[in-house]
Image: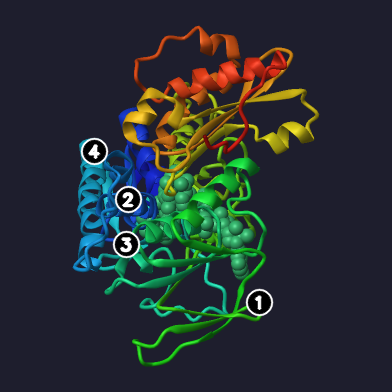
C-alpha cells in the first residue's frame, strides 16, 4: 500500500533536516528522501563541515597560532601526508552523519534511501534499490547544489578537482592553483597555504571576496601574501596541458599569457542547484538561472503545496540561512505561528586563515547611500587578550556608524575567532545600538570583546575630530 505523509522532504542537508525535524516536532507525519548513503548533504559531507575541519587541521599541524605565543615556527613535518590532513575531516563527517540520522529517528521521521522525482504535485517516485511511490500533502525541495563544471575544465577527480573531489585526494600536493577568489576559493587557498603548499589563486576580478568591505578584503590579501599565497588578479585559466605521467606538473595557460606549473588544480567558481532528474518541467514547476527553483517570500513555488529552501533557491546559499529557511517554510505550511520571517540582518563568516566576518553595511555601501558615516578601528594586538594570544595576523575590527545618531550599522572583523566575535556586532546592528551603548557595556576581561569598546572609543574620537587610528595601522 502506498504510504502517505503530511510532508515529504527531498534532501537531508541542513535545510531538509531542520524542516523535517520541526514539522515532526509539531506532530506531522514526515518523510525524508535522500539519494546518498550518508546524510547531511553539502553541509555535513562535502562543504561546510569538511572545509572547516580541514582549516582546524591545517592550523593544528602548522602550529600557526602557537607561533605568536612562543615565537617559534613549527615546520610541518615531512611525514605529514594526506592521511593526517584528511583524518579529522573523516571523523567529523562520520559523527555528523550519525547525528543527523539520530535526529531524524528521534523525531519519528521515516527516511527513504533513493533518488526522488515528481510524478505530480503530491506523488514522489523513489528510485534506487527499493523503488516505490509515496504521497505527501506538502513537498519540500531541499536538494541543495553541486559544483558547477564549465566545459573547458578537464576534471579528473585526481589532479583537476572541484570542492567535492578535493576531499578525496590520494596524495598531498606541493603546489596548487585555485581558480576563483570567492568563499570556497579563499578558504581552500588559505588552508593549503597554512599547510605550506605553494598556492596560487587566479581570479577574474581585481578584488577577492567581492562582497566584503574593501579595506578588509585588502587586509586579507596582505595576510594571504604573508602566508606565501600568490593571487593573480584579473586573470583566468584558458588552457590545460596534462601529461599522463602524474609526476609531471599540470601546465595551466593563463589569460595573461603566462604558464603556471602546479601539481593540482581546484575549480572554485560557483555552484548550481540540484534539480536534474526531479522532473520540475514535467509538473510545471518554475525554475530560474543556474538551475534554481523560484519561490516567493514564504518559500512557496508556483505550485502552492510545493516549497523549496536552501541552496536550490540560490542566494545566500549558506548552511546557516538554509536551516532557517527550512524551519520557516514549515511555519507557513502548517501555520505553526512561531517564526515570522528570516532575520534581514545576518552575518557572513569566512573561514579563511585568518577568519573574516561581517554584518551590516560596508564602507562602500555607506558611501553609496550618502550616509554621513564614521568609522572606528581597534586592533587585536592592542587588547590584553590579543597580547596573550600573540596576534599573528594584524587582526582588527572596524565599526561603521551614523555620525549623527551614533547608531552602528556595520561591523567587520579580520582575525582569529572573527566568526565567533561577530555575533555581538550582529546584535548591535540588529537592535540599532549606539557607540555609547558599547562603551557603557561591561565585558569579561581579558576578552577579545574589548575590540568593540576600543573601536567605539575610536569612533567617538572620529566624531569629536580626535580620530587617532587608521585601517591596517602597524605599530
Ligand atoms: C566548500 C564549501 C564550504 C561551505 N562552507 C560554509 C560555511 O562555512 N558556512 C555556511 O553557512 N555555509 C557554507 N557552505 C554552504 C552550505 O554547505 C550550503 O549552503 C548548505 O549545505 C545548503 O544546504 P541544503 O540543505 O540546501 O543542501 P545540501 O546540504 O546540499 O543538501 C542537499 C541534499 O539533498 C540530496 N538530494 C539532492 N537531490 C536529491 C534527489 N533528487 N533525491 C534525493 N535526495 C536528493 C543531496 O544528496 C543532499 O544530501 C559551504 C559550501 C561549500 C561547498
Ligand atoms: N563560509 C561560508 O559561508 C561559505 C564557504 C564556502 C562556500 N559557501 C557558499 O558556496 C557558494 C559558492 O562559492 P564559490 O566560492 O564557488 O563561488 P562564488 O560565486 O562566491 O565565487 C566565485 C569567484 O570566482 C571568480 N570566477 C568565476 N569564474 C572565473 C573564471 N573563469 N576565472 C577566474 N575567476 C573566476 C569570481 O569572480 C568569484 O570571485 C557561495 O556563494 C557561498 O554561499 C559559503
**In the rendered structure, are the residues bearing label 1 and label 3 in contact, judged by CB atoms less than 8 Å apart?**
no
Distance of label 2 from label 4 (alpha carbons) = 17 Å
Residue tagged by mark 1?
255
Q: Earlier in the sequence, mark 3 or mark 2?
A: 2
Distance of label 1 from label 3 (alpha carbons) = 43 Å
Local crowd size for mark 3, using a 10 Å CA cut-off: few (<14), some (14–19), many (≥20): some
Mark 1 or mark 3, which is nearer to you?
A: 1
Question: Which quadrant of the view contains residue 247?
Answer: bottom left
Q: Position of residue 405 (x, y in %)?
A: 70, 12
Residue tagged by mark 3?
114
Residue 120 in view: no
Q: Nearer the viewer, residue 404 or 18?
A: 404
Residue tagged by mark 4?
108
- Disc number placed over residue 194 in the picture, else none: none
Q: Position of residue 369 (x, y in %)?
A: 78, 31
Local crowd size for mark 2, using a 10 Å CA cut-off: few (<14), some (14–19), many (≥20): many
- Disc number placed over residue 40 in the picture, else none: 2
Residue at 59% x, 14% y: name it. 435
Looking at the rendered structure, the secondary structure element under dot 1 is loop
Amino acid at each position: 500500500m502506498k504510504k502517505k505523509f503530511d510532508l515529504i522532504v527531498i534532501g537531508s542537508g541542513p535545510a531538509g533536516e531542520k524542516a523535517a525535524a520541526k514539522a515532526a516536532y509539531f506532530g506531522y507525519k514526515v518523510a525524508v528522501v535522500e539519494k546518498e548513503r550518508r546524510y547531511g548533504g553539502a553541509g555535513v559531507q562535502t562543504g561546510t563541515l569538511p572545509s572547516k575541519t580541514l582549516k582546524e587541521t591545517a592550523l593544528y599541524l602548522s602550529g600557526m597560532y602557537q607561533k605568536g605565543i612562543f615565537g617559534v615556527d613549527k615546520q610541518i613535518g615531512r611525514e605529514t601526508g594526506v592521511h593526517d590532513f584528511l583524518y579529522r575531516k573523516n571523523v567529523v563527517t562520520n559523527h555528523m552523519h550519525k547525528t543527523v540520522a539520530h535526529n531524524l529517528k528521534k523525531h519519528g521521521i521515516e527516511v527513504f534511501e533513493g533518488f526522488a522525482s515528481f510524478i505530480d504535485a503530491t506523488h514522489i517516485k523513489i528510485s534506487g534499490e527499493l523503488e516505490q511511490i509515496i504521497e505527501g500533502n506538502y513537498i519540500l525541495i531541499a536538494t541543495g547544489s553541486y559544483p558547477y563544471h564549465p566545459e573547458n575544465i578537464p576534471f579528473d577527480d585526481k589532479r583537476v578537482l572541484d570542492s567535492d573531489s578535493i576531499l578525496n585526494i590520494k596524495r598531498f600536493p606541493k603546489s596548487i592553483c585555485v581558480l576563483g577568489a570567492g568563499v570556497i576559493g579563499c578558504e581552500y587557498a588559505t588552508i593549503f597555504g597554512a599547510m605550506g603548499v605553494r598556492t596560487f589563486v587566479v581570479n577574474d576580478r581585481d578584488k577577492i571576496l567581492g562582497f566584503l568591505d574593501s579595506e578588509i578584503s585588502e587586509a586579507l590579501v596582505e595576510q594571504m601574501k604573508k602566508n606565501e599565497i600568490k593571487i593573480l588578479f584579473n586573470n583566468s585559466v584558458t588552457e590545460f596541458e596534462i601529461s599522463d605521467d602524474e609526476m609531471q606538473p599540470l601546465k595551466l595557460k593563463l589569460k595573461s599569457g603566462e604558464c603556471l606549473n602546479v601539481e593540482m588544480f581546484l575549480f572554485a567558481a560557483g555552484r548550481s542547484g540540484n534539480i536534474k532528474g526531479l522532473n520540475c518541467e514535467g509538473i510545471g514547476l518554475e525554475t530560474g538561472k543556474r538551475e534554481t527553483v523560484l519561490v516567493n517570500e514564504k518559500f512557496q513555488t508556483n505550485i502552492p503545496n510545493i516549497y523549496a529552501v536552501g541552496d536550490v533557491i540560490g542566494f545566500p546559499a549558506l548552511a546557516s540561512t538554509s536551516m532557517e529557511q527550512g524551519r520557516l517554510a514549515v511555519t507557513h505550511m502548517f501555520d505553526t505561528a512561531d517564526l515570522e520571517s528570516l532575520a534581514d540582518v545576518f552575518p557572513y563568516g569566512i573561514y579563511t586563515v585568518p577568519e573574516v566576518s561581517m554584518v551590516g553595511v560596508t564602507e562602500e555601501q555607506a558611501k553609496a547611500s550618502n550616509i554621513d558615516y564614521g568609522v572606528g578601528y581597534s586592533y587585536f594586538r592592542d587588547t590584553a587578550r590579543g597580547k596573550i594570544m600573540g596576534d599573528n595576523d594584524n587582526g582588527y575590527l572596524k565599526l561603521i556608524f551614523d555620525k549623527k545618531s551614533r547608531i552602528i550599522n556595520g561591523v567587520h572583523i579580520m582575525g582569529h575567532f572573527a566568526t565567533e566575535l561577530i555575533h555581538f556586532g550582529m546584535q548591535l546592528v540588529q537592535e540599532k545600538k549606539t557607540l555609547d551603548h558599547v562603551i557603557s557595556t561591561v565585558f569579561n576581561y581579558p576578552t577579545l570583546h574589548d575590540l568593540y569598546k576600543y573601536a567605539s572609543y575610536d569612533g567617538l574620537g572620529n566624531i569629536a575630530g580626535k580620530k587617532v587610528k587608521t585601517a591596517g595601522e602597524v605599530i
